[in-house]
Image (cartoon, helix red, strand yellow):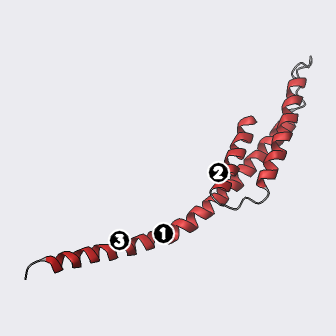
Amino acid sequence: MWRAVAAARHSVGVAGRAGAPVGDLPTLVAQLELAARSADALARADAGRADGSRSHHREVRQVEEAALQVHEAAVASLHSVAVAESDVLLPAVRLEVAALAAGVRAATASRRPA
């Protein structure tokens, strides 16, 4: 459960620092961490049950599912930004490289003795 929560926190932080839209995901991560602490405490308290049953599994699964959804939302946001930025970059790079190569060829040709 804690790995899922840490992955959600990490992906939201990376997305935010990269300038991707994250909406209320940082707030949800804080709420997720609180829910994880409670689920973890329940799991620890429930561990000593004599009958061996575990009432905490539902809460742990819900926290893990929520963490996964937050993580996926942050990654999707980052992906959309990365695609948008790279889609316009490649044609611009090709144009600039071609223009520079043409300029270098022209400069080289003009320096040759006639």
Nearest the camera: 67 or 29? 29
10 Å neighbourhood of mark 2: few (<14), some, or many (≥20)?
some
What's the residue at 62%, 57% (across, down)? Answer: 18
Relative placement, left or right, of 88 versus 110 is right
Can residue 57 be seen by looking at this rendering? no
Relative placement, left or right, of 31 versus 8 is right
Q: Quadrant of residue 20?
A: bottom right
Which residue does the numbered mark 2 point to in the structure image? 14
At label 2, which amino acid type do we have? Answer: Val
* Tag 3–tag 2 contact (CB < 8 Å): no
Name the spot of residue 53 as percent of width and height, x first. 89, 25
Name the spot of residue 60 as percent of width and height, x first. 82, 36
* Quarter containing the C terminus: bottom left
Which numbered disc covers residue 27?
none
Q: Secondary structure at mark 2?
A: helix
Determine whether 4 is above or below 87 in the image. above
* Quarter containing the N terminus: top right
Determine whether 78 is above or below 98 in the image. above
At label 3, which amino acid type do we have? Answer: Val
Relative placement, left or right, of 5 versus 58 is left
Determine whether 80 is above or below 106 in the image. above
Which numbered disc covers residue 89?
1
Which residue does the numbered mark 3 point to in the structure image? 97
Residue at the outermost bottom position = 114
Nearest the camera: 47 or 83? 83
Nearer-N-terminus badge (1/2): 2
Alpha carbons under labels 1 and 2: distance apart: 21 Å
At label 1, which amino acid type do we have? Answer: Leu
